Amino acid sequence: MLIVSLLSDFGTSDSYVAEVKAVLLSQSPSLVLVDISHQVAPGDVRAAAFLIERTWWRFPPGTVHLVVVDPGVGSERAALAIAFRDHFFVGPDNGVFTFLLGDPGARIASLPIPPDASPTFHGRDLFAPAAASLANRGWFPTLGQEPPSKEPHRLVRAEPRLEPKGWSGEIIHIDRFGNLITNLSTKNVPITALLSIHSEPGIPIVRTYAQVPVGTLLAYGGSGGTLEIAVREGSAAERLKAKVGDRVLAQQER
Amino acid sequence: MLIVSLLSDFGTSDSYVAEVKAVLLSQSPSLVLVDISHQVAPGDVRAAAFLIERTWWRFPPGTVHLVVVDPGVGSERAALAIAFRDHFFVGPDNGVFTFLLGDPGARIASLPIPPDASPTFHGRDLFAPAAASLANRGWFPTLGQEPPSKEPHRLVRAEPRLEPKGWSGEIIHIDRFGNLITNLSTKNVPITALLSIHSEPGIPIVRTYAQVPVGTLLAYGGSGGTLEIAVREGSAAERLKAKVGDRVLAQQER
Amino acid sequence: MLIVSLLSDFGTSDSYVAEVKAVLLSQSPSLVLVDISHQVAPGDVRAAAFLIERTWWRFPPGTVHLVVVDPGVGSERAALAIAFRDHFFVGPDNGVFTFLLGDPGARIASLPIPPDASPTFHGRDLFAPAAASLANRGWFPTLGQEPPSKEPHRLVRAEPRLEPKGWSGEIIHIDRFGNLITNLSTKNVPITALLSIHSEPGIPIVRTYAQVPVGTLLAYGGSGGTLEIAVREGSAAERLKAKVGDRVLAQQER
């Protein structure tokens, strides 16, 4: 089975996702299409980067990941195809694939723009055909220019810092439950640390929600490998009026 | 074809649904994945119970239903696998499968928790692998502990009561159209009854929307087998400020 | 591969889409199901007509398009099956297929209503079984009454008019990004025209977003073949408080 995952800011009220899927299936009828999300906020490349980095490697080898959050569509920004650890990635050169760009094992090509492509919908007219080709044929010599003439764009990523008081990081994603996902790795922060955010000084790290009373703030090693802050059966985002980028400090308990 | 249906409160903005699907497809690439819904309100087990009871039996025999609304994830609550009338069900023991628990034909096992499972994402690390195994192999001896050591949890369900004035029931679901779905069976309530809710005293039962003028309240035997209250080309939920649990009375017309 | 595309106003919070899919897969387990959208506003036939006209032809030949926005369900309105340019269409006779009704190549049949169909859910009980049959067997003699006894219903479509000042059209869709999609064809309006809407007098036509500064209004030939108005990295719908039906004028620049 050849799988294409789809991640975009297209929403699900318009025909855009279906047009992309129709192009994929027209070119390769046996593809299995799996939505990651189409609810990325319009143009929010950083949010898409978070989602694809977290998700891609759980798919079977050979999967093509079509990631189109593309505010620069039609401009001079390059269109990329990437082979990385038996997976393929296709999307605009806007930093969404920053997580793999440092890796010497990544093969990167810039894709030619088909002459009849809509200047505002490369997802359908450029990236979908490229994804279908990659799914069917794997990496192929005439795919594009390899390497691209310009170094791919990278997002500056917020990295946690070890400060005198403890690890300092930030919120990198807020999920549907209002859970605050930080960039503090569970490998660095000891289980005995207390997390502070805004004026909340000492949130203990526990294993799971059920270990605190309903309505209580807690922290835990999240399912993506970093610390998260939540309210049991509630929303930490609402409680703390937290947003992406807010600072979180992990202090060693004393 | 092996089908897995998915029902959760994960929403579609995060990577959670895709992570579950990636695990399913990694283990069994030929699975056909069908979303029931991921828009269940966070932790609303009762809403998920309504949706799965209504939908499961329309799928082909052999379908595995993965139902993960799991506020107790990581706690002592059991993880269940169930075989029932040629279908399989997988999910936390929180009452979501109440509709089948009374049935002597149901086989129930409690699933072991994989040692490396995230304590906050059993959907991905426990239930998805179990669902893929069930889809591929059917019920198998080493699946888990059968029966579970603890009687599975049941929701107390609102049952309609025959009162002197007529059948008394309640709203059990409000759909996207603002239609109010009650628990009053069309088998019990005569077609000549009048429904009352809040201060609306005599809503007649008709066959379909088109039998009343636009903007008018009506009742009808709904597509799930119970009475519903709607406004033609409008929202009964908005009109009546109704919510799940509100009482509905079916009085015999005189 | 046999593909069924699905377009409805069912939303994704209820079980309705899944019930339709379960019926399709029960009748024909190898179908590939592709959602166009289920977020059409309740009963908005015109919006569904826009989406299906734009999308259907990108799918492979043989695709069945199941389009159920059906405020007249259960009334006397006919149920249609249509064969048109190697595609099939199934849905209520409410004008949603207006775009193809004028074509002499379209074969049209009215479908019988199964006696046990829910009077409020023909999507599941009538159209889904018909779609599965069409996907499997193609057009078949006993499908229904061909042609229907009544001429299919047509929507009156807003056509652009050439006025002394230039082409006059209107907004026919607003997408997730707040882009305003007009009915002004890029074939008629010269690239040098200026678009005016509300009190905005002279919006220039450019190739793509990146050609104007962030926050600026622009017009461009959209991916559906008509002119669109947008705000770069913003929402034209919000900026202009625009809605479907608002008039747009394309004046020749002087």
Image (cartoon, coloured by chain):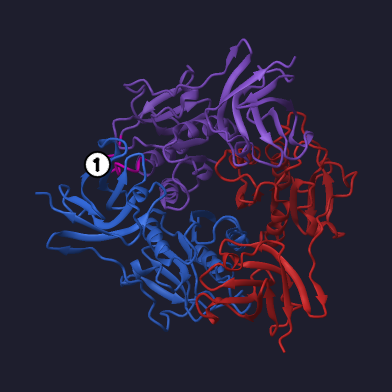
Chain colours: A purple, B red, C blue
Asked whether residue B119 is drawn in magenta, I would say no
Q: Which span is picked out in magenta?
A: A113-122
- Position of the C terminus of chain A, as image quadrant, is top right
Q: Where's residue A101, x and y in %?
A: 46, 21
User: Under tag 1, what secondary structure?
Assistant: loop
Q: What residue did someone put label 1 on?
A: C207
Please determine whether, in this image, residue C197 is positioned above or below residue A253. below
Quadrant where the N terminus of chain A sits is: top right
Q: Residue furthest top?
A: A164
Residue A69, above or below C65: above
Residue B62 can be seen in this image:
no
Image coordinates of residue B235 in percent, x first then y, are 55, 67
Residue type at mark 1: give it: Arg
Front residue of B231 and C146: B231
- Quarter occupied by residue B177: bottom right
Give B101 or B249, whichever is nearer the viewer.
B249
Query: Residue at horizontal 39%, vertical 46%?
Result: C177
Task: Give the residue at x 83% y 41%.
Answer: B144
Q: Is residue A26 left or right of residue B135?
A: left
Is residue B83 found left or right of C228 in the rendered image?
right
Which residue does the image show at 29% across and 41% down from the upper left?
A: A119
Classed neighbour count for the residue bearing mark 1: other residues with Cα under 10 Å, few (<14), some (14–19), many (≥20): some
Q: Is residue B149 above or below residue C30?
A: above
